[in-house]
Image (spheres, rainbow, N blue to C red):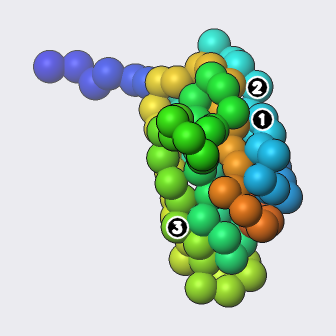
């Protein structure tokens, strides 16, 4: 049986974002994206939603919650890794501020 070679991935986006309760898009849609990761390095939990801004009141709409870090940029906050999603990604806090690192891998 022969070896199957797969293409290598490379970092396309690797950015740090200050997040508030108004929310924002952290990754654009990219049909070439192989995977993405988002890590919360701030002190407030962060809500993640694919395709639209998270809703944290009333009828709540979000895909994931990333736990807060034990201290600013400690590296132990929640991490989300997703393969094969090429749509937009949004994040927000319910209140206060936090910081996330959003990385997109293409290949």
Tell me the CA gap for discs 3 and 1: 19 Å
**Drawn side of residue 4 relative to residue 20, left or right:** left
- Residue found at x 80% / y 40%: 24
Residue 107 appears in the picture as rendered:
no
- Residue found at x 63% / y 38%: 54
* Residue 46, above or below 89: below
Looking at this view, is 80 or 18 the one in front? 18
* Residue 33, above or below 58: above
Q: Name the residue under label 2.
A: 28
**Drawn side of residue 89 relative to residue 64, left or right:** right
Q: Quick check: marks 2 and 3 in contact, CB under 8 Å? A: no
Q: In x, y percent, where is residue 96?
A: 78, 67
Estimate how packed mark 1 is, as few (under 14), some (14 to 19) or many (20 or more) residues with alpha carbons within 10 Å: some
**Helix, strand, or loop for circle 1?**
strand
- Residue found at x 81% / y 46%: 22
Q: Mark 1 points at which residue?
A: 25
The tag earlier along the polypeptide, 2 or 3, is 2
Estimate how packed mark 2 is, as few (under 14), some (14 to 19) or many (20 or more) residues with alpha carbons within 10 Å: some
Q: Quadrant of residue 46?
A: bottom right
Q: Quick check: marks 2 and 1 in contact, CB under 8 Å? A: yes
Residue 86 appears in the picture as rendered:
yes
**Helix, strand, or loop for circle 2?**
loop
Q: In x, y percent, where is residue 43?
A: 68, 76
Q: Residue 46 carries which label?
A: none
* Residue 103, above or below 50: below
Looking at this view, is 82 or 11 the one in front? 82
Q: Mark 3 points at which residue?
A: 67
């Amino acid at each position: 049986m022969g070896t199957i070679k797969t293409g290598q991935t490379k970092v396309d986006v690797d950015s740090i974002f200050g997040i508030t309760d108004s929310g924002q898009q952290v990754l654009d849609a990219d049909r070439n994206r192989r995977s993405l990761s988002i890590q919360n390095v701030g002190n407030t939990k962060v809500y993640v939603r694919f395709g639209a801004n998270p809703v944290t009141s009333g009828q709540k709409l979000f895909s994931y919650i990333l736990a807060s870090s034990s201290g600013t940029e400690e590296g132990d906050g929640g991490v989300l890794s997703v393969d094969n999603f090429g749509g937009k990604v949004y994040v927000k806090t319910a209140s206060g501020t936090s910081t996330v690192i959003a990385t997109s891998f293409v290949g």
